[in-house]
Image: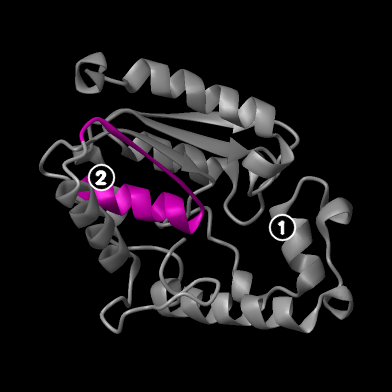
Amino acid sequence: MHPGRDGTHRPAWLTGIDDLALAYLHLLRERRLRDVLVLGSSLGGWTAAEMAVRDNAGTITGLVLVDAVGVRVETEPITDFFALDARGVAEHSWHDSDHYHLDPADVPAEELARRRTNMATMRVLAGDPYMHDPKLLRRLRHVQAPALLLWGESDRIVTPVYGAAYADAFGNGRLEVVPEAGHLPQIEQPQATFALIDAHLRRTSNPACRR
């Protein structure tokens, strides 16, 4: 759970994804963790990428980014999530938009309040510049840890073409597209998504660090 989401406290110094990435890196080092696979979805994927470019201790040995935002691809702009209504969110985020669309009139007041708070946190962390770090794309070439980028074939928040450019920017990145899935393939196609993650983990894990 990222600070500031679902009613959790957001410290005053936490004003960007870079702050979040540094905080998580410090946590890994404080706990003396090694051979760490960092997995993140959407904003979490952006956070994972920012962690990797700052990891000068070799703590992170693998990455999985699921439909991540965070970079600017000239030909593939990120959809303005803040401008979408509920139907627009469903159509851009899901392969089966009718199944996942929720009419706000049917959502309990407490849930609507939680969503508004989460949206406010998102604006603070990723609103300006919108959903990306202008310097991140060119920095990714220095990341040599194997990076798997999983992408829902039907994602219209950030398209698979955006995902391909993201993967190509890493020193050791590759893209896998998940059919019949949108921005959250781990929800729409969990079996296929987790099989790809497990295979990546087997390829990247260092057995010596588990002894």
- The image shows residue 36, relative to residue 8, as above or below, that is above
* Circle nearer the N terminus (2, 1): 2
Whether 39 is among the magenta residues is yes
Disc 1, SS: helix
- How far from the left and from the top, in percent, is residue 188? 73, 41
Residues shaded magenta? 34-53
Residue 165 to residue 207: above or below: below
> In which quadrant will I find the C terminus?
top left
Name of the residue lying farthest toward the left:
57
Q: Residue type at mark 1?
A: His
* Distance between mark 2 and mark 1 Cα atoms: 28 Å
Circle 2 residue: 52
- Pointer 1 residue: 92
* Side of 155 where 28 appears, left or right: left
Q: Residue at x 67, y 38 (%)?
A: 153
Location of residue 105 in the rendering, given as x and y in whole percent from the top left corner: 88, 80
Label 2: element kind: helix
Residue in the picture at 23% in, 48% down: 28
Binning the other alpha carbons within 10 Å of mark 1 as few (below 14), some (14 to 19) or many (20 upward) gives many
Decide: is 4 above or below 187: below
Instruction: Identify the residue at image location x=38%, y=78%.
Output: 10
